[in-house]
C-alpha cells in the first residue's frame, strides 16, 4: 500500500480557494480494470438498494 495515498490512488492538495484532487505521484491513477470492477460492484449495490427500498405506488 502506498504511504502517500493509502491505496486510494488520489492525493488532496489544499489551496486558499479550495481542494485540488490529483492522481498519486507514486502509484498513478487506478488501472482501468480496477475502476471497472469497483464500478460494477457499486452498481450492483445500487440495484439491490433500489429493490429493497422501492415501494409500489397505488393511485387513490
Image (cartoon, grey):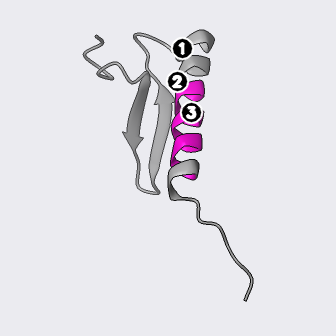
Question: Residue 30, image x and y in percent?
Answer: 52, 16
Q: Residues within 10 Å of mark 1 (few under 14, many from 20)?
A: few
Q: Residue furthest right?
A: 59
Residue under pointer 3: 44
Marked residue nearer the N-terminal end (3 or 2): 2
C-alpha span from label 1 to label 3: 15 Å
Residue under pointer 2: 38
Marks 1 and 3: which is nearer the front?
3
In the rendered structure, the answer to whether residue 16 lies left or right of residue 4 reads: right
In the rendered structure, the answer to whether residue 11 lies left or right of residue 47 reads: left
Q: Is residue 39 above or below residue 7?
A: below
Q: Is residue 1 above or below residue 42?
A: above
Q: Nearer the viewer, residue 11 or 14?
A: 11
Question: Residue 57, image x and y in percent?
Answer: 67, 73
Marked residue nearer the N-terminal end (1 or 3): 1
- Determine the image quadrant of residue 10: top left
Magenta range: 39-50
Q: Nearer the viewer, residue 46 or 12?
A: 46
Residue that appears at 59% across and 42% down: 47
Q: Is residue 47 magenta?
A: yes
**Would you say the magenta stretch is mainly helix, strand or loop?**
helix
Report whether residue 23 is seen: yes
Task: Tell me the tag on residue 34.
Answer: 1
Amino acid at each position: 500500500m502506498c504511504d502517500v495515498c493509502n491505496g486510494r490512488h488520489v492525493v488532496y492538495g489544499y489551496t486558499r480557494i479550495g481542494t485540488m484532487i490529483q492522481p498519486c505521484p507514486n502509484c498513478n491513477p487506478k488501472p482501468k480494470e480496477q475502476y471497472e470492477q469497483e464500478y460494477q460492484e457499486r452498481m450492483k449495490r445500487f440495484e439491490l438498494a433500489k429493490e429493497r427500498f422501492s415501494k409500489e405506488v397505488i393511485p387513490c
